[in-house]
Amino acid sequence: MAISAESPASTSRLRPLPGIKVEVAGQAASGCSTTGGEGKASCGSSDGQGDMPAEIWDKVKNHPCYSEEAHHHYARMHVAVAPACNIQCNYCNRKYDCSNESRPGVVSQKLTPDQAVKKVLAVASEIPQMTVLGIAGPGDALANPAKTFETFRQLQEQAPDIKLCLSTNGLALPDYVDEIAKYNVDHVTITINMVDPDVGAQIYPWIFYNHKRIYGREAAEILTERQMLGLEMLTARGILTKINSVLIPGINDEHLYEVNRAVKARGAFLHNIMPLISEAEHGTYFGLNGQRGPTAQELKDVQDACMGGANLMRHCRQCRADAVGLLGEDRSDEFTLDQIEQMDVVYDIEKRRAYQEQVEAERQAQHAAKQSALAEQGADDGMKVLVAVATTGGGKVNQHFGHADEFQIYELTTSSTTFVGHRRVDLYCQGGYGEDEQLPSIVNAINDCHAVLVSKIGACPRDELLAAGIEPVEEYAHEFIEKAALGWFAGYRARVASGEITHIPRGDAAIRQGAFKAA
Ligand code: CLF
Ligand code: SF4
């Protein structure tokens, strides 16, 4: 893949729009770009507030998608009130969740605004660290404006401490920016996969615009103009924007660098480059025609090439349109409409605030532990490794290897720990017993890592990992992730320096889709 960080950014085909002031360094980007943005792996909030302005920090500090650090501690939920869509993406089949914001899997229940509000209040009373409500499909939030804004209107009144968030393909966005601002929707995601209509024509067969269906390049040209206009209008109103881009090998992989530059120039706060999910059984055009998704290394290469542009998000889980919980977990089964009817819902804003203060104290402790572990790393020897971590949340190494349905991946150097992604895996422990046939697929998923940090691991997977050259590490159980990872890394470097072991760079890994999550 020929992606160069030196590639020229070409936004020449994107016309500036009259009356819209576009700050290249970015009003919204001021949150991160005031520190230069150069080399940052994700939003500046992954390292605490830093020199981010207080009003931006206030918006991102407990939003699990806008802050990598926050995603260990705070939860989000989606309500599926938006079934219709106004475009067709070649990676989407409407029987499945919107691929913009979700992994494939049918939405179990579509909700009316009243049902959605009831569900949000029930979840908020049960999960006090749930801080964000998003509308992300299963179609497009703004192709269903009445339901979307009625939900936001009610929630703004009844749950004023919950941040409101929406996700859209951007086609209708310029028509609704004022309404988005009216309901204090502070976070908007636009899925932008291209800024070149010739690339767009390979991703979008048609759009529905001005009461008619428009096909091919013309459709992509309208879509990109509407997306850019909508982004500029949001930036002008001080609304934080995140751009989601689906990495489609051979179609837009090299082009995403240009997308990154174009959205940064229009004030996007964050750019989330995520892998195409493409399987024949999903029934999508790409899935049926053999279009593959990227490998872990291909995804990382594109993300790394885009560093220094808009700040990057790498912790996206491609959630369902009805997801509930921490990113990576899904508690939607606990909150069906029938179950909500039985619940005693008490929306106690003070109780939520008190709980979140405890969460904040834990988060500060994690941040401090990371800083002190970095300070102890010693001289830089240029080594860079990936490690996998099993965690149930709270920023700690606190999950048994056999219970992990995903591993979080960190890149370690002597001066940094960077969250670079997650890998879904088949659950190893099924009904109390280890399923050894799952092991090769788990090894494939973390094959680029030198170690896997877990709270506990059985003898059989331990041997298999060692044979594959991945070191299982239990001695940091229940410690904060970065502190644990850096503790292992210091020991590893010492063993290499002493000649006890030889450092061997590792290969690529497979991004798993459709992994078994339950026994
Ligand atoms: Fe939902 Fe999206 Fe808001 Fe987050 S998800 S609407 S910004 S609250 Fe987050 Fe899920 Fe990735 Fe979306 S991990 S798919 S980026
Ligand atoms: Fe599907 Fe979302 Fe694309 Fe609409 S915008 S076609 S719902 S992926």
Image (cartoon, rainbow, N blue to C red):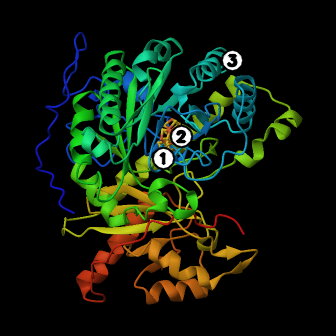
- Residue identifier under label 2: 361
Q: Name which quarter of the figure residue 518 lies in.
A: bottom right
Which of 277/417 is in front? Answer: 277
Q: Residue at x 26, y 60 (%)?
A: 301
Which of 69/260 is in front? Answer: 260
Q: Residue at x 27, y 22 (%)?
A: 27
Mark 1 vs 2: CB contact within 8 A = yes
- Quadrant for the C terminus, please: bottom right
For label 2, the SS is helix
For label 1, the SS is helix
Residue 101: tell me if it is visible. Answer: yes
Disc 2: residue Cβ within 8 A of ligand 1's nearest atom = no
Which tag, 3 or 2, sits closer to the chain's start?
3
Mark whose residue sits in front, 1 or 3:
3
Question: On the rendered structure, is 419 left or right of 92?
Answer: left
- Residue identifier under label 3: 158
Q: Residue at x 61, y 70 (%)?
A: 400
Residue 458, placed above or below residue 91 = below
- Quadrant for the N terminus, please: bottom left
Image location of residue 11, percent across then percent down: 17, 34
Crowding at label 2, few (<14), some or many (≥20) Cα neighbours within 10 Å?
Answer: few
Crowding at label 1, few (<14), some or many (≥20) Cα neighbours within 10 Å?
Answer: some
- Residue identifier under label 1: 365
Which tag, 1 or 3, sits closer to the chain's start?
3
For label 3, the SS is helix
Question: On the rendered structure, is 406 left or right of 214?
Answer: right
Structural distance between the alpha carbons of marks 1 and 3: 32 Å
Q: Which mark is residue 213?
A: none
Q: Amino acid at mark 2?
A: Ala
Q: Amino acid at mark 1?
A: Ala
Which of 273/448 is in front? Answer: 273
